[in-house]
Image (tube, grey):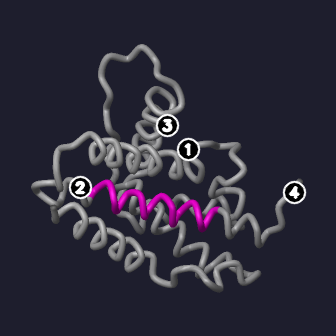
Amino acid sequence: MALTRRQQLRRVGLACCHCLRNLAYYRSWHEAGQPRRNEQFWVSANGAFLDITVLEWCKIFGDSKGKHRWAAVVTDVDAFMPAMTEQLGIARGDFDTCRAAMVKYRDKFVAHLDDLQEMNVPVLAIAKDSTMFLYRYLREVEDDVNAFHDAPADIAEFYERFAIEAQGVYGHD
């Protein structure tokens, strides 16, 4: 079943939100200093936040043929990536390195458990910034069908709200 433009925009926007919410939860664990308790529940929950962050990011940036990739909803595909890397203050190679690390983590440790002896958690700064950029771009440039009428207006505020929520949980016994 083919998705309408509105459905495509909305799903990519939701993937951005899911990615950023899970990233906020994951990062807040480490920013809390002394996490709640070093119990397996909390360790597992934090690991799941990382895994979902990576899975959602890879839906939108990791797969060149994925149904929910950024290029499926951006009208001017050729202009998007240069605009994003310029706004983020990075070289295209930096983004490509981030993408490769995210896809490797997804493929080798989340989707499959390969024979690698060491797990390398990807650096998530570019992942966060690229997701925020895409979300803003979709709302400001691409939303010609009112796909985001009930979605967060400010994605940085959305991220911060969940970071604060998680810090409150992690910081209390």
Q: CA distance from mark 2 to mark 4?
A: 39 Å
Which of the numbered marks, if any, corresponds to residue 2? 4
Q: Main secondary structure of the magenta part?
A: helix
Label 1 secondary element: helix
Instruction: Give the residue at mark 1.
Output: 62
N-term-proximal mark, 3 vs 4:
4
**Front-lying residue, 102 or 38:** 38
Q: Residue at x 76, y 68 (%)?
A: 7
Disc 1 residue type (three-letter): Gly
Disc 2 residue type (three-letter): Trp
Horizontal side of residue 37 vs 99, given as left or right: left
Eyeballing the image, is 80 above or below 97?
A: below
Which of the numbered marks, if any, corresponds to residue 29? 2
N-term-proximal mark, 3 vs 2:
2
Q: CA distance from mark 1 to mark 2?
A: 25 Å
Residue contact at pointers 1 and 2, CB within 8 angstroms: no
Q: CA distance from mark 3 to mark 2?
A: 23 Å
Look at the image and give the residue range highlighted in magenta.
Answer: 12-27
Q: Nearer the viewer, mark 3 or mark 2?
A: 2
Label 3 secondary element: helix
**Front-lying residue, 167 or 102:** 167
Q: Residue at x 38, y 17 (%)?
A: 116
Eyeballing the image, is 65 above or below 148?
A: above
Q: Nearer the viewer, mark 4 or mark 1?
A: 4
